[in-house]
Image (cartoon, grey):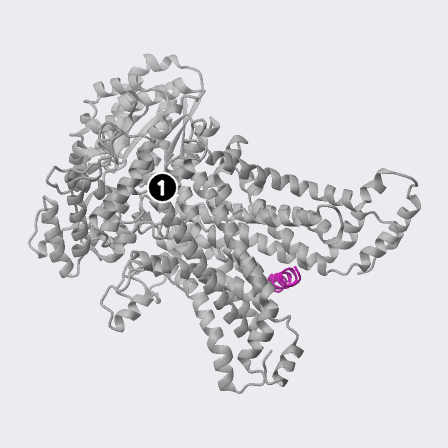
Amino acid sequence: MGNGTRRDFLKITAATAGAAALPWRAQAASKSITLLHESSFIPAFDAYMKNTIAPLYEKTTGVKVNYELTSVGSLPTRVSTITETGSGADLTMDILLTPFLYDEKLADLSDIAEEVGKKQGGWYDAAKEAAVVKGKWKALPFANIGQLMNWRTDWFAEIGVKKFPDTWEELYEAGKKLKAKGHPFGFELGHGFGDNHGWMYPLLWSYGGHEVEADGKTVSIDSSETAAAIDFCRKFFQDTMMEDCLGWTDVSNNKSWMAQQISCTNNAESILYIAKRDFPDIGKVTDQAMNPQGPKGRFHFMNSISHSVFNFSPAKEEARAFLKWLMTTNALGDWYNSADSYYQPLLHGYDKAPMWNVEPRNIPYRDALATAHLPGWPAPASPKLAQSVAKYVVVDMFAKAAGGAKTPDVIKTAQAQLKQIYSA
Amino acid sequence: MTIRTEPLAGLAQRAPRGWSLSTWLDRESVFSWLMMSLPILFLAGFVGYPFFYGILLSLENRPVAQPGTFIGLKNFITDFHDPIFWQVAINTFVYTGAATLLKMVGGLGLALAMNQNFRMKNLVRAFLLLPFIVPTVLSTVAWMWMLDPAFSVVNRLLIELGVPPPGPSWLGNPILAMCSIIVINTWRGLPFYGITLLAGLQTVPPELYEAATIDGASGWQRFRFVTLPLLKPIIMIVTLFSVIFTFADFQLVYVLTHGGPQNATQLFATYAFDIGMSAGQLGLGASVALAMLPALGILIVAMTLYMRRA
Amino acid sequence: MVTGYGPLQRVLRVWLPVGFFMLVALLPFYWMAIASLKPNSELYNPNISSLIVYHPTLKHYVDLLTQTGFLRWTWNTMLVSVISTAISLVLGSMLAYPLARMRFAGASLMAMAVAAVYLVPQPLLFLPLADIINRLHLGNTLTSVILTYPTMLVPFCAWLLLGYFKTVPKDLEEAARIDGASRLQTMRRIFLPLCTPGFISAGIFAFTLSQNEFLYALIFLTKSSVRTVPVGVISELIRGDVFYWGQLMAGALLGSIPVAIIYSFFVEHYVAGLTSGAVKG
């Protein structure tokens, strides 16, 4: 934080005070809206909304913003209750595929989306993937929580690698050497939610494999490209990792990193953040890099967060107005700033924002946005896709192969599962 | 405790003749059904109704936040063709069978060991019950850490004995992962078995043992021909409860492995949860949950028959 | 009962097996205790023994009690468990008394029906129950769990109490009936007070099961202020993908203590109740 933020804050106040003379002043009625959010990894982010942005909005428009938090992992359950009962919040945060699961209960935000795109430098393509359901914007993409490669610069330097390997094969070679030196890799292959998807879907895509084609109907997992990705995954696991990784969930690689057992993993910014805060010696030698590329390109997993308005909300107009204000004024930039680039904006207008200078090691997260996709790409997101993710079709396919199963067998199983999901 | 008959005597004098409400209410059948009406209503409302509603759900395509459409048995056909469903079924049976067996044998051992007089016996008995009374998710979190090869005492020991580091992966290797959940479930449930069997052991009249000893029976024969037959009813009941609890177990797997690695520890309850809550397919999830019922029914009937015959 | 062994025999027959069971039962608790006292630098260090703490700290306990809703969750859990237990004991005895004492048409059918209800495990009901709770607008209220916990507790209490009731001699009730008391009066004033041990043991078991419940709480209670200890500890002592292990262990230990204390006072009754229920039932 520091001078930059204070100046920005003053800028917001000035700009909003001026703008308040115009459209927003019209809503003089004292109302309140409830914004449901999942508890952020960065406490300062939640505090900023509660203590700075919400009061500012109330002062400007008279509408009180109740910022309600639910614990990590509980958001889908909570949204489920709200949509089933028709009450409980006016706006909500969306994670990943929730706009597609609940789309019938979400308001159409296409007009606001267009305006935001114009004002903030245009949306990333990934943003449209995350929020457009059947041609309509049912959510306003807020950010991506990227999953990238974390690597120990000191141990990699010991084997002569100064820059993070560019291709999967190069990473594999480095991994073999590092495992021999007692610093194996640790990628999640178990039933977590982020750190497994973060490298497995990109791996599949970078070899050209697809679960389902862009038409959303044709199951195409059975291909030589998929087989190539699987074969790579098998040797990658067996020659560079510890057996325990097969059962890892999201917390395991964080724990392992702080226990200094692994030299490379795929994770969000949480490892660097915690390392800098609690284990500074480890923090000094931790760096982040984009996923390696395969024969068919470099890809990243999109873990998108968006905001939606419930179409049954009695304060729908106020909710939409708030969202528009949030996404088109400087409030947005300030909110991003409070989280130390943990959230990567999906708007090109923020590509050169000062927030990236705070921790240069986070810049790869911004660069990854151009190649980020939702799981199940190139098929459009849908409840069927959600089923494939919930049943760990791709994850288990890779994990079983890593554990020794034959490639044709695991492809057959995955295909049977996908056929059944997509034919129903 | 003494009974004060004065107020009751007063009642007798007021007893009316002929048919009256109070006499009718005192008839055994009337009283019984009236008395049971509240609990029956409660159970009908909160168990019966959801149960039948669950059956209806399983026959519908019911995505979350959308209305349901009737599709007959399609969900069950989907499950039938789902390779994971069958793995889940096998896992649940193996898990339940192995854990119950271990708990029965271990519990019997515990009961026999505790069926002796020694100092601090009551304190020991209280301590031994701890794994059972402590909330499962809390102790499971401790196990998560204990089974991490980097921190596990067992791995440490094995490495000392020459096993190459880091030692077995208790939660990564699919077979070991299943063993791990069986062990943790046994750890948790054994005290219940043991203390209950102990209570049963203590009701066996010592004269039977003396008679058997006089007849020349060895320790093992005493156990087989005196103890076991008398314990059978208790064993049966405790096993019944244990089987039901274990078959429908959710907490342990949810916290420890979430069904991994590669569905090696996925059980009916956790699979139904993933489908219903993560994928939002309430109908399909209900169908997986309902699949427990016939399996459970078969298990219980088989057990009852076996116990009756043996 | 076996008595009169020499010291060596005593060790072999008593202390070795008992000691083994004690070790197995208590090792995880020892681990929890040690982990909760270790500072993070020791906690994450795989090179030192995980069974010894070198620089114990109370930081995790302090953080747990001051920075999380742990105390609130404990209060919620106690409240829910006590009320659910009370409801279950009342409903359970209302079911068990007629089945134990009365003869009427449909009695055996009723007994089987109660047993059948017990066969319906929680995971079978959670999806439809979630729907019902939502429609009653009881989501995120303690009422939702207070109403749903007895569904698993009532059949068990009924079965346990049934077994216990059958062991109570009938003479006092018969005397009261002769004196003209109605059945209701007999039940309330004569019979039930005699059954305190049975109620205690059923009550303790019900209380324990309530404390342990996780699935319904996970689904119905998503607001921190209404959560119970199991759900609160698992859901909120993580941020993103980082477990606060020290606090988790501290929470696990603190969450176990109230239950353990209550048990230590009532374990006699618990065992007695189980016996009469199981042996004669």
**Percent from the top left, x then y, of residue C53?**
35, 65
**Residue C48 shows in the view:** yes
Q: Chain of mark 1?
A: B
Secondary structure found at label 1: helix
Magenta segment, prevailing SS (helix, strand or loop) = helix
Within the image, what quadrant is residue B93 found in? bottom left
**Residue C90 shows in the view:** no
Q: Nearer the viewer, residue C136 or A61?
A: C136
Q: Is residue A56 left or right of residue B291?
A: left
**Percent from the top left, x then y, of residue C157?**
62, 52
The image quadrant where one finds the N terminus of chain A is: top left
Q: Residue at x 62, y 54 (%)?
A: C203
Q: In the rendered structure, which segment of residues is drawn in magenta?
A: C266-281
User: Alpha-carbon neighbours of circle 1 within 10 Å: few (<14), some, or many (≥20)?
Assistant: few
**Percent from the top left, x then y, of residue B43?**
61, 42
Q: Which residue is under mark 1?
A: B81
Q: Is residue B237 left or right of residue A410?
A: right
The image quadrant where one finds the C terminus of chain A is: top left
Residue C273: in magenta span: yes
**Percent from the top left, x then y, of residue C138?**
53, 34
Residue C87: in magenta span: no
- Which residue type carries mark 1? His
User: Farthest bottom residue?
Assistant: C6
Q: Nearer the viewer, residue A187 or A212?
A: A212
Q: Residue at x 32, y 25 (%)?
A: A139
